[in-house]
Image: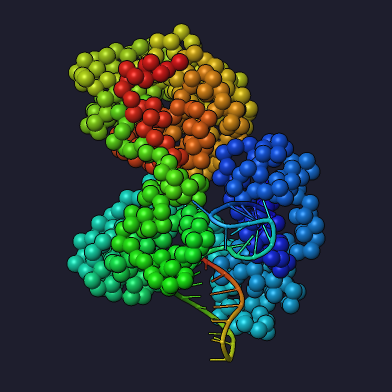
Amino acid sequence: MAEQFDLLADLLELDGEEQFRVLAYRRAADQIRSSAGPVAEQALAGEAKNLPGIGKTIESKIVQIVESGEIEALTKRKERVPAGVAEFLRLPALGPKTARRIWQDLGITTMEDLRKAAEAEQLRSLPGLGAKTEERILKALEETAKPREKRTLLAKALPAVQAVVEVLREHPASNEVSEAGSVRRRTETVKDLDIIATASDPAALTEYFTKLTWVSEIKAHGKTKATVVSHDGLIFDLRVVPPDSYGNLLQHFTGSKRHNVDLRENAVKRGLSVSEYGIKDVETSEVLTARTEEELYEQLGYAWIPPELREGAGELAAARDGELPELVELGDLRGDLHMHSTWSNDGKNTLEEMAEAAKALGYAYVAMTDHAHYLREGRLEAQWSEIAELNGRLEPFHILRGIEVSIRADGSLDMPDDVLAECDWVVASLHSAFDKSPTERLMTAMESPHVDCIGHMTARKLNRREGADIALEKVFAKAVETGTFVEINSQPDRLDLRDTHARAAAEAGVRLVVNTDSHEVDALAYAELGIAQARRAWLTKDQIVNTRTWKQIEKLKK
DNA sequence: GCCGTTTTCGGCCCGACTGTTTTCAGTCG
């Protein structure tokens, strides 16, 4: 559905339609993409128009998709605008206005003809286009021919940014240095890595940044701004700013775009113009700057908003009304309820090593949840003896007798009930046949009195595979009905449930668990990512099960 | 096409950069 609305927006734009209609369709596409709810069903029930950015017209177009497969206006518009022209928009630096003229004035409708025209220097016959534009288009065509670059996982980006921030802080010319952008908002993947700073000598700091040993390419280098690429392909942006408006700039460069647009639209209604330099009173032209973000938000009548919430999903209204949630923090976790040891073939550290590491992190308990299929023929009992022995030694730290069972294609679990009944903690997960009625299988698993928690629900792998097609609202309702917990899996390429899904789960009344699913000691630190995901889902300490003592959890279990 | 602490009509974020324009449009973030 989102793709249809995006395509419709592209075609309308190329056809010269009014830009705000185009924008409205793009906004609807974003809304549909990030929605955790069954948008099609909501549209059929006349309820989709309650979603922000979706009104009567777009709702009826969603119904058209459900009933006939395609938006009628899209079918019609495709007859007017050649498909190839819409592809032009994917080329960087080639926007709708230029693409339209290339199509209408030169009759070019395919990428191949575009390349030929650029090579034959025909594009410069259009007013406003010159040699540089042709050159740029040829370069863009080459770039798009290459395989699509993948987005960088937060787990890779976050330590990289933090390391650079540290290095810049140590430079004598720098004052304040901060991560910004999507990394600061802790989005699951990022495109580039943003850093902002104040400095006594901006040019010196920028220069230093471009000369760091790991820099393999300098993409841009000015007095206050530079973009470099690291040896491992990460793109870093540094922006050096005056200290008086540090708060304005940090806020601006943290984004998200949606958050900033919403913030500024609301300000405009009150006669204020917000930019990265300050808040300008439109009538008096007075400019108010802010040294901190707290000041800035206060000047606009909001409580400070944690970066993880800045996605234009209701945070401004909540901040205005004093209703922001008190977000869960890493330090709130008392234990980790999903991890593996060498008892699983894919585990890299022994049970003892995992337990010691978790204890060193300050946890009071862990559930050792090795895969059921490695624990047959007496191996589970053998593991339990080892756990008992370790528990005697590590007291008061406690290792729980856990297990991770797979939900088979028929919904059954790969360990008999009488064994599961002996476990302290059972995680049930989809590991295969993701396209075989995943919704029903999850719901069947939840019906089991022994299943405490569903692991990595959609089984997605970032940059590798989409999650299973699951009717989340049904599964969440079943989780509430049966008292089954649902995991936020902290593995860098899982982060499953994702932010919007976790938020919907909590709103439905589901209790969530933040687990690492560690297969080695170092992976226990991924809890930071899971907590970030939980924060992006607006979750409080109370909504996360493993912020409690094990004794309290035992009372909460089904 | 959406939406409402001025509004059911008339607005819709803001600035930097680039190339081509002799004063600004297009694109991007």
Q: Position of residue A502 (x, y in %)?
A: 48, 36
The picture places residue A191, in percent across and down from the top left corner, at 46, 56
Of residue A427 and residue A252, the one placed in the foreground of this image is: A252
Image vertical order of residue A436 relative to residue A258, above or below: above
- Which residue is found at the position 33% from the left and 54% from the top? A294
Looking at the rendered structure, the number of numbered marks drawn on it comes to 0
**Residue A473 sits in quarter:** top right
Question: Does any portion of residue A190 appear in the rendered image?
Answer: yes
In the figure, A51 relative to A438: above or below? below
Front one among A382 and A90: A90
In the depicted structure, whether residue A16 falls above or below residue A125 = above
Seen at 48% across and 21% down, the residue is: A484
- Residue A202, given in percent of the width and then of the height, sits at 28, 72
Image side of residue A411 versus residue A78, left or right: left
The answer to whether residue A391 is above or below residue B26 is above
Residue furthest top as drawn: A418
Residue at left 34%, top 40%?
A528
One can see residue A120 in this view: no
Residue A27, picture quadrant: bottom right
The quarter holding residue A73 reads bottom right
Choose between A455 and A504: the one closer to the eye: A504
Q: Residue at x 32, y 68 (%)?
A: A241
Colouring scheme, one of rainbow, by chain, secondary structure, one colour: rainbow
Q: Is residue A229 left or right of residue A8?
A: left
Task: Report x, y in % for residue A226.
Answer: 36, 69
* Quarter containing the C terminus of chain A: top left
